[in-house]
């Protein structure tokens, strides 16, 4: 158990819909990262938050957005869903000092999204 | 686009055999990490290598970081079925950039 909790574990929805994925980081971790894992693209970095503020952005679509709340949990919102958005979405957390990632990422078990 | 190329993509071996997985990049990273991911779970860190030429051992696993800090390898000696999983290398800058992974299957 990594200490990172993601909900829901599985989600099936239709194209055009909107979903929200939730992540609770390990106790004490200030950084939350979102990754998308698909068969053809591997693990792709989406976005990072540090103590409530966006710190880094990766290959995140404009239809996707995220936020980190004062209690440090994070949500990833996916809207206008397309078939190609079907993937595993991982949240990870870490203890990060300053602007440089230097430590270990602790991953949750992922949320499997299926868009039909 | 993957900054890190892993090879081979798939590897299936018999219990007791040795295997090597490679991770290559055109970029220099401050450090490189190896993770293992099992079905239904998130990746779990195995090791971080920082210094060019560094070699780290974790029981039957040996990790090497290239002198130029652009490539790395993971060698497993006398593989066991419990070593089965997806092995991912990740280059470290302000985030982790992952390779596509090598799926290792160790048959009993």
Image (spheres, helix red, strand yellow):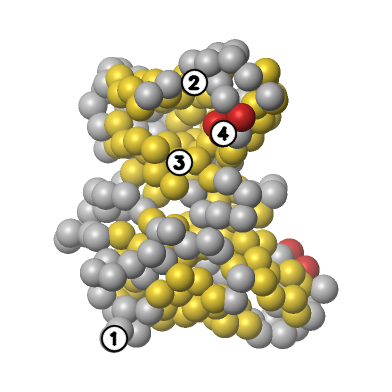
The location of residue A2, given as percent across then percent down, is 40, 58
Q: Is residue A26 left or right of residue A22?
A: left
Badge 1 is on which residue? A70
Is the residue marked by circle 3 packed among few (<14), some (14-19), or many (20+) residues within 10 Å? many
Labels 3 & 1 near each other (Cβ < 8 A): no
Badge 2 is on which residue? B76
The C terminus of chain B: image quadrant: top right
For disc 2, the chain is B
Front disc: 4 or 3: 4
Give the camera-side residue of A47 and A3.
A3
The residues tagged by marks 1 and 2 sit, at their Cα atoms, a distance apart of 43 Å
Q: Residue furthest left?
A: A98
The residues tagged by marks 2 and 4 sit, at their Cα atoms, a distance apart of 12 Å
Q: Is residue A14 left or right of residue B104?
A: right
Badge 4 is on which residue? B82
For disc 4, the chain is B
């Amino acid at each position: 158990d990594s200490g990172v909790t993601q909900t829901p574990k599985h989600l099936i929805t239709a194209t055009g819909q909107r979903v929200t994925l939730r992540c609770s980081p390990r106790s004490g971790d200030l950084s939350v990262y979102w990754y998308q894992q698909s068969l053809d693209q591997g693990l792709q970095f989406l976005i990072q938050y540090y103590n409530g503020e966006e710190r880094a952005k990766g290959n995140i679509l404009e239809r996707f957005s995220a936020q980190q709340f004062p209690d440090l949990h994070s949500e990833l919102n996916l809207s206008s869903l397309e078939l190609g958005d079907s993937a595993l979405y991982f949240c990870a957390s870490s203890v990060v000092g300053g602007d440089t990632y230097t430590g270990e990422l602790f991953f949750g078990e992922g949320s499997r999204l299926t868009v039909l | 686009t993957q900054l890190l190329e892993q090879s081979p993509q798939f590897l299936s071996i018999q219990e007791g055999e040795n295997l090597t997985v490679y991770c290559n990049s055109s970029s220099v990273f401050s450090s490189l990490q190896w993770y293992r991911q099992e079905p239904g779970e998130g990746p779990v860190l195995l090791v971080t290598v920082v210094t060019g030429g560094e070699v780290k051992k974790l029981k039957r696993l040996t990790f090497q970081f290239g002198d130029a800090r652009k490539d790395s390898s993971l060698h497993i000696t006398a593989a066991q079925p419990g070593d089965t999983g997806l092995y991912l290398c990740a280059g470290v800058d302000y985030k982790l950039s992952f390779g596509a992974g090598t799926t290792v299957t160790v048959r009993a």
